[in-house]
Image (tube, rainbow, N blue to C red):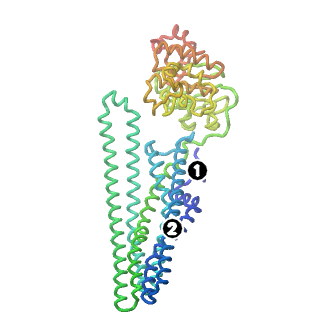
Amino acid sequence: MTTPDPQRPRRGADILRTALRRNTGAMTRGTVLMGLYQAGETAFPIALGLIVEHSLQERSLGSLGLSIGALAVIITTVSLSWRFGMRVLQEANTTEAHRWRVQVAACGLQPVARDVDLKSGEVLTIATEDADQTADIIEVVPLLISSLVAVLVAAIALGLADIRLGLLVIVGTVAILSVLSVMSKRIGAGTQEQQARVARAGAKVADLITGLRPLHGFGGNHAAFASYRKVSTDAKHQAITVAKVNGVYAGTALALNAVLAAAVTLTAGWLAFDRQITIGELVMAVGLAQFIMEPLKLFSEMPKYVMMARASAERMALVLSAPPVTVPGTERPAAGGDLEIDCVRYGALRKLKFQVAAGEFVAIAAYQPRSAADFASILAVSIPPHAYEGAVRVSGRELSDLAIEAVREHMLVNPYDAEIFAGTLRTNIDPSGTSRMVPEAVEASMLTDVVALHREGLDHSVRDRGANLSGGQRQRLSLARALAADTEVLVLHDPTTAVDAVTEQLIARNIAKMRRGRTTVVITSSPAVLDAADRVLVLDDGVITAEDTHRNLLATDEAYCVAVAR
């Protein structure tokens, strides 16, 4: 049921090409300005050589003043072109990195999950470090071209003095790049592995933080720390390996550049001694020999950054090119809130079959937690329709034919472990800021005491994962968010397990009152909620085994009485 998306980048090379294509204008401006900078830098030793040459010949103060003015123009050009060139390139780099971060995040937030074997911590690393390193290609290419301009200008200037000096620069540059391009491939492979290990370490620590309280509860925190330490140590060893390779690369580049500069200087000295070039040309050659070490250094580092950008782009492609788990339909549910489960078989569910009429309040007493979790996952479309047998119909239309966004607007499934986000009570209840049911939802979920406890009321700050709230407060906040959405169909999974019996009674009545006329399904073992429902379905061993009101089932079904009575 998956089809490729031709608009989505398929490989790391495609990602790099996309980045380059949509920054052509900025890169052109940056290349021109950085080319001016490098040309100005190259012109400085050439100008010095000409000044020496003419000063020795003419010995004129006017010529000296003109030369000083020319140097001032060169220095001004160098300063301004560098300043504005780097501003243009860094702005484009930052903007491009932002685009890729948003695109990777959008993939993770799409209604349909992607078929990619990466944990959330790994995706986070890809959306940050890899996005930044991929965007570096925006700066790399203009700097590479401008460095090439500097080397070519130097080679031409030296060639005009003596063809052997020009050829020496060109041949030496080609030899240096040939050696370093081979070494850069190893850096790219090592960097990709390093990023993968860092991402695994990030995923591990994210998992540990999520499960910190349970770990402390059964004393597993020490074993968990040892597990993280091992993963982090692997990442450290790989980082050290990459650093060593980078060190060898940088040292080799510096040594080769120094050898070429020394060769140009010695050759120019020999030619001047043999009177084949003038003193002014010697000064120019020595100045260029010292100068070209900077563009050569920059030029020789570019292959390394290209390989690093490509390695990061390949990791981004793991997320961006991953196909969706399923391709949803395009239809929307019809008006009404009836729900039909038709012979669904998945996991612990065996030929599950029942109907909920529009506006009905139905409670499902699931004897096995696995059955409840599988059923909730199917309704939440966390399980693609092609992965289970049977059909789920919402307002008469099969779930597989409906657009996921339309399903989520029509039917909300609130899990028992719903996330609480950093922000305020209000932003957790109404993330979009458009609900008109916030006061009613706060009252129905019995969250009023939490709001009254703080001077800020609904604007009271909430920490990440609700760390400053108790378990019962987090559960009631999650319930308030589900009720405030006011969807046509609402499915709640164990919404009152963390509250006391009195509060549970009040919440059950409030849900029934607030949802009157709207379809509501609650998967629960709470006697209070079961009693508030219009009818109760007993889910045992993957099938519906009984159906009646809560009180009738208590009177006639001994197994039900044992399962739900407290």
Give amino acid for label 2.
Met
Q: Is 96 placed left or right of 311 in the picture?
A: right
Residue 483, percent from left and from top: 58, 24
Nearest the viewer among 552 and 473 is: 473
Q: Which mark is on residue 4?
A: 1
> Residue drawn 46% across and 52% down?
130
Q: Is residue 246 above or below residue 347?
A: below
- Of mark 2 and mark 1, the one earlier in the sequence is 1
Instruction: Identify residue for label 2.
Output: 34
Nearest the viewer among 254 and 193 is: 254
Residue 360, percent from left and from top: 63, 19
Foreground: disc 2 or disc 1: 2
Nearest the viewer among 400 and 179 is: 179
Within-10-Å neighbours for mark 1: few <14, some 14–19, many 20+:
few
Q: Is 2 placed left or right of 170 in the picture?
A: right
> Residue drawn 59% across and 48% down?
3
Residue 228, percent from left and from top: 33, 41
Residue 190, quarter of the rendered image: bottom left
Please, what secondary structure does the residue beneath circle 1 have? loop
Q: Quadrant of the N terminus?
A: top right
